[in-house]
Image (spheres, helix red, strand yellow):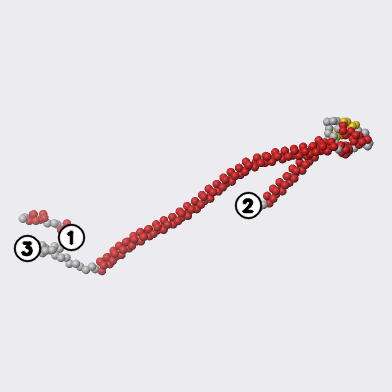
Amino acid sequence: MKDSDQDTKRIPKEQLTAWERWELPLLDERGNQVVQEQEVKPPTAADLEEIRQAAREDGFQEGREAGYQEGFEKGRAEGHQQGLQAGEAEGREQGQQQAEEATRKEVESRVGRLEHLLGELVLPIQRHEEELESVLVNLTTALARAVVYRELSLDSSQIRQVVRKALAALPSTADNLRIHIHPDDLEPVREVAERLEVSPSIIEDDTLMPGGCKVESRHSLVDYTVEKRFQKAVQGMLEGQLSNRAGAEDEEQGEDDDLPPG
């Protein structure tokens, strides 16, 4: 080999970056390479510390993950239980409120229907009461009129007092007096007229009932006919009844107002 070829295979020292020791491999009798057992060196204190640190970190990480998982599971279970209890309580409360509201509406609806039915029943009764009251008043009036007329037809002597009251109702300065009576009352009225200072005219009128009269002057008229007197008596009686009823209703209303609210 030439020196030039050796120079081309030589690596310049400027390109060398590292070097290591090389030893001739150990060969047996047959020329095979003998594998040398590597010498096991005992770990140093730094190696042991590193191993312990790695073990601590591994244990810490493992414990942390286990604790996290356990805490997560426990928290999820507790949260689920709390949420379940809260949901059940809220559901019960809402259900109770809805039930109470539904019951209240049902009661109000039934009370409204009952009041409507009672109104439908009471209204005809009130109408019948009013009609019955009117019939009773008319019947009572008719009976009273019949009794009065019967009494007057049997005893016409009351005409004297009737004429005196009619004359007393006129002004004292009245003149041109005219007394209208039924022909059957002529004699008793004539006796009354004879005792008067002023002689009145007596006019017989068969349209008047016995026991009644009309007395006229130049500017006045006093109606003391039986019909008129009876009408006034009945009217006064009815007004008295209405007044008593109104007073009773006012008293009842006052008692209701004094009651404490329910």
**Residue occupied by mark 3:** 30
Residue 16 is left or right of residue 189, and the answer is left
Nearer to the camera, 45 or 262: 262
- Which element carries disc 2, helix, strand or loop? loop
Q: Residue at x 37, y 58 (%)?
A: 73
Residue 96 visible in the picture: yes
Q: Which mark is residue 262?
A: 2
Q: Nearer the viewer, mark 2 or mark 1?
A: 2
Whichever of callouts 2 and 1 sits on the residue coming sooner in the sequence is 1
Q: Amino acid at mark 3?
A: Arg
Residue 127 is left or right of residue 200, and the answer is left
**Can you say whether 26 is above or below 237 in the image?**
below
Where residue 215 appears, as percent x and y from the top left, is 87, 34
**Residue occupied by mark 1:** 18
Quadrant for the N terminus, please: bottom left
- Which element carries disc 3, helix, strand or loop? loop
Q: Nearer the viewer, mark 2 or mark 3?
A: 2
